[in-house]
Amino acid sequence: MKKITKILSVTSLILAGTGAVFAQCADISAPGVWDFVKTGTNPVVATTANPLSGTCSMAVPVQAGKRYVQDDMSAESTIRGSFQIDPNSLVMPTSGQQRKIKVHQVQCGAGCSSGSTVDWLQAKLRLQPGDVYKLGIWAREDNENKISTSVNLVDGCNTIEYQLISGNPGTFRLWVNNTNEGAPDFESTTANFSNRFADRVRLGRSGTGTNIVVGSEFYLDTFESRRQTFIGNSCTP
């Protein structure tokens, strides 16, 4: 698992020296690896079983409860984020309620809208009929409206990248297994993102539907965040 960066100055691309923090499969809860780790009896762990990048990835067991890692930042009004996800052939229901897993959140812990909500962006994993994995992603406007989209995932490594810019109008862009910055897979440039900011990002399992089949796991890797410049990392060697 790699935690590539924390957001620095406007001109910074990555935090020098962080590189592949799990190059030796370090304990995820080790000091300096993440700002916060939500642990428990079924925590996320670093593993060599299915490295999406480098030598390790983060194995996320499918259970009830929240288990995630967290990267803290300072009230960022613009953020680019990227991470890799592999559904790992998860057995999931293809219809009905409570069948999704919340895997990623961009948040303002103090509340960042008129309704004092926390999530600016949220992503949930699900399975559709025909064994098609999808990631449902939304960004919340100041009036609580959700700008939503869903994207297909391969049953293997996928690179998810997004851009959020606060303001009215604000911007929400999304790239999936896509290294062409000029052709996002989803784009909204008229969003009302007044009062929006990011002060923490969570990656792992932040919520699990009650109809999810427990006992298996999926994989996450290579989280990176920036203020500017396209990240564009790819699962393709």
Image (cartoon, rainbow, N blue to C red):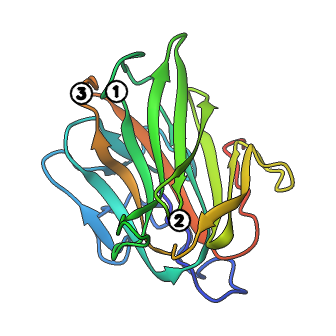
Mark closer to the chain start, 3 or 2:
2
Q: Would you say 175 lies left or right of 108 here?
A: right
Please report the residue visible at 22 percent of the width from the left and 29 percent of the height from the top.
Answer: 210
Q: Would you say 138 lies left or right of 111 here?
A: right
Q: Position of residue 155 (x, y in %)?
A: 56, 26
Q: Which mark is residue 214?
A: 3
Q: CA distance from mark 2 to mark 1?
A: 33 Å
Mark closer to the chain start, 1 or 3:
1
Q: Position of residue 39 (x, y in %)?
A: 20, 57
The residue tagged 2 is 20
Please report the residue visible at 78 percent of the width from the left and 49 percent of the height from the top.
Answer: 184
Judge by depth and name the residue closer to the eye, 47 or 98.
98
Q: Where 228 falls versus 237 (above or below)?
A: below
Task: Point out the residue furthest to the right here.
Answer: 182
**In which image quadrant can residue 154 be found?**
top right
Which amino acid lies under the numbered mark 2 shown in the image of this protein?
Ala
The residue tagged 1 is 99
Q: Where 156 falls versus 1 (above or below)?
A: above
Task: Point out the residue furthest to the top here.
Answer: 130
